[in-house]
Image (cartoon, rainbow, N blue to C red):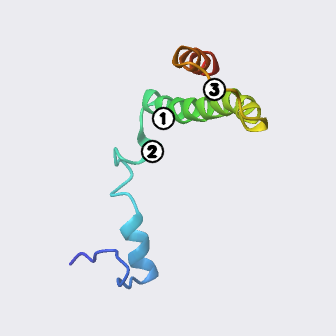
Amino acid sequence: MEKSIGADATLTPEEAVTALDWTGPNDPENPENWSAGKKAFHIAYVGLQCFVVCVGLHVYLPTAANNLAAPSPPRSTHQRYQALLINSM
């Protein structure tokens, strides 16, 4: 009989290990059994996400400091779109 893992479930240490273990040494969901391409994809995906966040912060933060320093005079709609386009590059 399977036990569900929830807030009120009580498992012995042996049951907890088997509940979180892979089904066997050849389990295709085990990352140790993934192909090299699948491993490379997952590593590249996480690395790309980290790179995008870091670059985005380095692009945004210098302009955010300028925007908080002093209020800018009122602009026309065209100037606002132009400033938004330049700041987003």
Callout 2: helix, strand or loop?
helix
Image coords of residue 28 (percent x, y): 34, 44
Task: Name the quarter where the N terminus is drawn.
Answer: bottom left
Mark 1 is surrounded, within 10 Å at the Cα level, by few (under 14), some (14 to 19) or many (20 or more) other residues, namely: few
Mark toward the viewer: 1 or 3: 3
Mark toward the viewer: 1 or 2: 1
Callout 1: helix, strand or loop?
helix
- Between the residue at mark 2 and the residue at mark 3, the CA separation in whole angstroms equals 56 Å
Q: Relative to 73, say whether 19 is above or below.
A: below
- Please give the residue where the numbered disc 3 appears in the rendered image: 74
**Disc 2, disc 3: CB below 8 Å?**
no
- Please give the residue where the numbered disc 2 appears in the rendered image: 31
The residue drawn where x is 56% and y is 18% is 76
Image coords of residue 35 (percent x, y): 42, 32
The residue drawn where x is 54% and y is 29% is 44
- Between the residue at mark 1 and the residue at mark 3, the CA separation in whole angstroms equals 47 Å
Task: Check residue 42 in the rendering and tell me which mark sits there, or answer none.
Answer: 1
Amino acid type shown at disc 3: Pro
Amino acid type shown at disc 2: Pro
In this rendered view, identify the residue nearer to me: 50 or 65: 65
Image coords of residue 82 (percent x, y): 58, 14
The answer to which of marks 1 and 3 sits earlier in the sequence is: 1
